[in-house]
């Protein structure tokens, strides 16, 4: 019997979209398999990125072994963005072993969407301006002047070098678009003159009608490009799945000389000359979250939805602590957003954040001054103060229909039209489930369905309508452009569920602009490099990174790959960027 482990399901929709019997749907806020419909074909387990879908009680054959010793030049811990470092080091003639604690490769990189490439040979060929130095300055300001400029420069110039490499090793122009950011629907801090974006999934999760979460986007594309390059060029890269790095080994001079890992059968020791930590953040380590989150991650009544993969347990932090290196809490971030219609249908999630709709708590009261598409980023703390940390977007049918038609007609959303066009089918389906959407013919009935006193809820609607007539939101100061009254007697009405969610918990490993890992006194650990979510490079406590996490991850992995080779060969390293 195939089941879904709700504790680690990230709700990427892969299993539900692929299931030939349509036996998988939401129960509450997680997917569950209807055993009466299930064909026991096992496809869900094959496509599940996190291992949440599995055959219950299936006997596992474990071959126990004595300690195994392997030799390599480079060990990369993590098979997501770390595959870039592994591939690049192997292209320079090095023997590489990649350790992946999960049963599948990719990690959070497979969930990631876009890396912001400010300039490349492709940009140059199309005549885009080189804005990298301006981007360094803007990123420095956006990061509160806390993130060091040399690190920012490594990220910005490094991702450009990486993108040139990616162009050389893939059919990039069939997968990505390069356009003016004003013509893009990319969400995030976009500073470059030309935006490279991937408009459609190319591999994995192709049947998914939700463009909000992978696998299948930019991170997946990079992972497969690495695997294809390794095979095509016959590179010496060995990937060990279900093999978790546990201890870093130093020689008598304090230099990296190996890694001790563990697979299901026992200990695996790898002698090596350099190690890169690309092992992700700590979003699945409850002890570290309790210690380093700057909000109460566990104190609410409704569990915060986590998109982190199960392998994000802070292994970089714990391995360095064994060496006496402690993380700096001021350079660690635990993301928390909300309200958002996650992990449900993304078209409804986008509509629900439009400012023309109101947000009410479970008491039927407005609690914020809705701002256009900004609720998710601006009110994550405020929603924590609401009953059960839940909010509902109140959507009359006619108003919702007009919103959907506006999204479909927006030329910037050309690649999302197929998601938005099915909105009516989506909302009617979710209204049959117990959590995502409540539907009623009257406002009184809708108030009951969301758990509120119907009179209190209707009175709140009437008060809001009076603000609309005046053109002034006396409670929250909402922009008058979005003050649209809610009809009192023209249903149906929908209440679209929203809750808190966390994408990841990041930071803990301090690096310099060469991606070398530093001790607390600022000295380097020779031969040890790191990049991606496990590092504190782009992070500050309680703040979003000024660059997308995937931008830094790809840049750092590319730079580390080159710098590890130079370190092993005894050659001088440059001060960042291309090695």
Image (cartoon, rainbow, N blue to C red):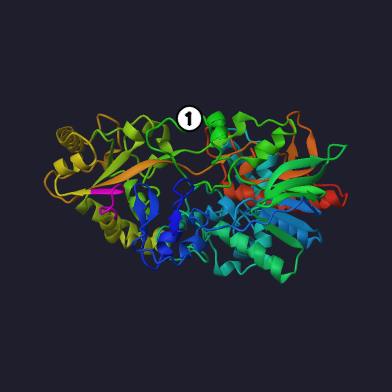
Position above or below: 92 against 307: below
- The part of the image, by quadrant, that contains residue 3 is bottom left
Q: Is residue 477 left or right of residue 143?
A: left
Position above or below: 101 against 300: below
Q: Nearer the viewer, residue 91 or 145?
A: 91
What secondary structure do most residues of the magenta stretch adopt? loop
Residue under the image location 68 percent in, 44 percent down: 153
Residue on which the image places disc 1? 295
Residue 201 screen position, x and y as percent: 49, 64
At mark 1, the secondary structure is loop
Residue 321 screen position, x and y as percent: 70, 33
Q: Nearer the viewer, residue 186 or 524?
A: 524
Q: Is residue 447 left or right of residue 53?
A: left
Within 10 Å of the Cα at label 1, are there few (<14), some (14-19), or many (20+) other Cα atoms? some
Residue 506 screen position, x and y as percent: 58, 40
Residue 13 screen position, x and y as percent: 43, 57
Residue under the image location 64 percent in, 46 percent down: 279
Q: How many marks?
A: 1
Asked whether 437 falls inside the magenta stretch, the response is yes
- Location of the N terminus by quadrant is bottom left
Position above or below: 396 against 227: above
Q: Is residue 157 visible?
A: no
Residue under the image location 17 percent in, 32 percent down: 456
| Extent of the magenta region | 430-438
Asked whether 113 falls inside the magenta stretch, the response is no
- The part of the image, by quadrant, that contains residue 421 is bottom left
- The part of the image, by quadrant, that contains residue 23 is bottom left
Q: Is residue 171 visible?
A: yes
Q: Is residue 557 left or right of residue 546?
A: right
């Amino acid at each position: 019997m195939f089941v879904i482990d709700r504790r680690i399901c990230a709700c990427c929709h892969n299993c539900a979209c692929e299931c030939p019997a349509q036996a998988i749907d939401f129960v509450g806020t997680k997917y569950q398999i209807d055993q009466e419909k299930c064909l026991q074909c096992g496809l869900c387990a094959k496509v599940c990125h996190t291992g949440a879908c599995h055959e219950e009680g299936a006997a596992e054959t474990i071959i126990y072994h004595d300690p195994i010793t392997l030799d390599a030049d480079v060990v990369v811990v993590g098979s997501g963005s770390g595959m870039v470092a592994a591939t690049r080091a192997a292209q320079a003639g090095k023997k590489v072993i990649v350790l992946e604690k999960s049963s599948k490769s990719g990690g959070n990189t497979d969930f990631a969407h876009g890396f912001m490439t400010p300039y490349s040979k492709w940009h140059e060929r199309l005549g885009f301006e080189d804005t990298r130095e301006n981007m360094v300055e803007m990123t420095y300001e956006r990061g509160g002047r806390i993130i060091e400029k040399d690190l920012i420069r490594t990220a910005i110039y490094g991702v450009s070098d990486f993108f040139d490499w990616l162009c050389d090793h893939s059919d990039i122009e069939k997968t990505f678009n390069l356009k003016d950011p004003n013509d893009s629907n990319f969400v995030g801090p976009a500073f470059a003159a030309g935006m490279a974006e991937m408009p459609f999934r190319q591999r994995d999760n192709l049947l998914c009608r939700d463009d909000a979460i992978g696998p299948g986007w930019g991170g997946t594309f990079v992972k497969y490009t690495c695997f294809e390059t390794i095979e095509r060029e016959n590179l010496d890269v060995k990937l060990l799945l279900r093999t978790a790095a546990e201890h870093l080994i130093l020689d008598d001079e304090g230099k990296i000389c190996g890694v001790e890992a563990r697979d299901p059968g026992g200990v695996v020791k790898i002698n090596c000359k350099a190690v890169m930590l690309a092992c992700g953040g700590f979003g699945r380590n409850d002890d570290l979250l309790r210690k380093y989150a700057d909000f109460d991650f566990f104190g609410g009544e409704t569990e915060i939805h986590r998109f982190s993969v199960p392998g994000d347990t802070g292994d970089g932090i714990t391995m360095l602590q064994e060496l006496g290196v402690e993380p700096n809490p001021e350079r660690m971030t635990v993301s928390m957003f909300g309200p958002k219609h996650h992990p449900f249908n993304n078209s409804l999630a986008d509509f629900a954040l439009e400012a023309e709709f109101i947000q009410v708590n479970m008491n039927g009261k407005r609690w914020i001054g809705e701002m256009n598409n900004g609720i998710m980023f601006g009110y994550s703390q405020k929603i924590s103060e609401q009953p059960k940390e839940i909010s509902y977007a109140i959507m009359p049918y006619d108003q919702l229909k007009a919103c959907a038609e506006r999204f479909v007609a927006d030329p910037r959303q050309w690649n999302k039209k197929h998601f938005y066009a099915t909105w009516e089918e989506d909302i009617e389906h979710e209204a049959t489930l117990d959590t995502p959407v409540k539907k009623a013919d009257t406002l009184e009935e809708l108030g009951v369905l969301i758990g509120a006193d119907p009179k209190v809820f209707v009175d709140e609607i009437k008060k809001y309508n009076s603000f609309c007539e005046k053109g002034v939101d006396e409670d929250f100061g909402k922009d008058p452009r979005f003050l649209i009254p809610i009809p009192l007697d023209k249903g149906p009405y929908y209440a679209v569920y929203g809750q808190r969610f966390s994408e990841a918990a990041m930071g803990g490993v301090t690096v310099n602009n060469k991606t070398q890992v530093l001790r607390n006194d600022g000295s380097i650990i020779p031969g040890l490099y790191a990049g991606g979510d496990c590092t504190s490079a782009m992070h500050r406590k309680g703040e979003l990174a000024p660059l997308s996490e995937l931008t830094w991850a790809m840049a750092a992995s590319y730079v580390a790959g080159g710098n590890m080779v130079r370190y092993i060969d005894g050659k001088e390293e440059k001060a960042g960027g291309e090695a």
